[in-house]
Image (cartoon, rainbow, N blue to C red):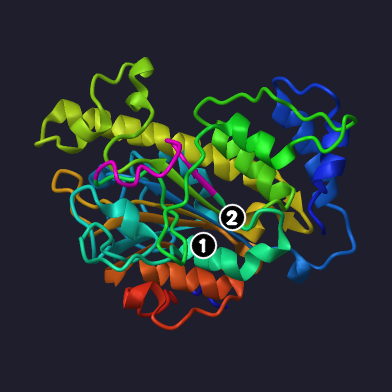
Amino acid sequence: MNILKHRPINRRTFLRGTGVSLALPWLESMSSLARAASTAGGIADSERPKRALFTMWGLGMNGRDFTPANTGRDWNVTPILKPVAHLRDDFTLISGLKLTHSGGHGGDRTFLTGTATHKADAKLRISADQELAEAVGKATRFSSLVLGVHRGTGFGSGTIDKTLAWTRGGTPIPAENRPHILFDKLFRAESPDEVAARKVGAGRTGMFDVITLALQTDSTRVINYYARRDLNDGTHCYAYKGCPYGYHEMTHHGEDPDKLKWLTTVDTWYMEDWAYFIEKLKSAKEGDGTLLDHTMLVWGSSGGTVNAHNNTELPTMLVGGHKIGIKHQGHLAKKDVRLGNLWQTMFGVMGVKVPDHFQGGEADGVIKE
């Protein structure tokens, strides 16, 4: 992947235009305002903000039904990738990435830090999103947003955390899991004449809806979202849709055909939500492109072969960024490449100098093609 190759709507104006009461469908009325502001002329694409969003879907997935057997732009569509197949020009699949620390269920702390943080003598390290936020976050109201399917940090309660974000001092940053609270945080009224919505539709895609608004209003340019925890998925694994297993139980499938079938089914449902998010950003016009064109999204995981819970052959997808220098290449098959190299590549796209010993040396280059 040859990766190295406006003013968004003001939140005050945004709130005025949405009126006194915003119930469902709240997003449509607000997105129309954001679209109008984002397409305003007079600003060169080079001056528009660059954005990065990191997501982690813990415990991996059924790689047999995710990773295409062939590489290049004409990769064969696998069952799990069907929901995003029509968007293939907007992303690159990268196979062969690894985490050199963690194991079992410990990928959450090392996913963005490159640190073996579960060891007693571990030196806790700032996460990549927070390092990026230190460099670009002064331009926005929030230097970053830290989100998850569970609220808080989870630190000290076991080996699995609820957050992916760590400060430079090695302190975990609590994640927010409630879309309506996040909305209130972003768009809280500042005067009696600016009353923001207090009721927001949550649902499976509620967080993606609010993330879209946060990016459209330039409230932040760096986001991480712990979309599925490394021990359980945080959503009861779609029991309401008939799935008889917990996600963790399915990953220990032991070659049970029924568990493998349901694992692929549930992974496909998750991918449908991801496709919804990509399409939302792609439909939001910005300059002579879209919000997606100016934003990098990572769909990532800490798990490779799920039955073994190893941390190699991580399912990874880099999405968007057409207008900020990313040229997508379909499916890239790497071998034994550190996940931190992808973060280092993204720093370069964002125009941020990578510090010495980035990720504690766990990143040792960029992904060029």
Asked if residue 361 lies left or right of residue 198, the reply is left
Residue under the image location 57 percent in, 72 percent down: 349
* Residue 293 against residue 182 in the figure, above or below: below
- Residue 257, position in %: x, y? 14, 29
Mark 1 element type: helix
Tell me if label 2 and label 1 are in contact, CB under 8 Å.
yes
| Residue 130's disc number | 1
Counting labels gives: 2
Asked if residue 316 lies left or right of residue 246, the reply is right
Looking at the rendered structure, the kind of residue marked 1 is Gln
- Residue 15, position in %: x, y? 82, 36
Asked if residue 164 lies left or right of residue 190, the reply is left
Q: Nearer the viewer, residue 301 or 222?
A: 222
Residue under the image location 23 percent in, 63 percent down: 101
* Residue 356 against residue 91 in the figure, above or below: below
Magenta segment boundaries in residue numbering? 146-158
In the rendered image, which residue does mark 2 sit on?
A: 144
Main SS of the magenta part reads loop
Q: Quadrant of residue 307?
A: top left
| Residue 303's disc number | none
Q: Is residue 264 visible?
A: yes
Mark 2 element type: loop
Q: Is residue 68 visible?
A: no
Looking at the rendered structure, the kind of residue marked 2 is Ser
Residue extending farthest to the bottom is: 356
Q: Quadrant of residue 24?
A: top right
> Does the magenta run of residues contain 151?
yes
* Residue 21 against residue 172 in the figure, above or below: above
Residue under the image location 57 percent in, 31 percent down: 206
Look at the image and tell me in which quarter the C terminus lies.
bottom left
> Does the magenta run of residues contain 51?
no
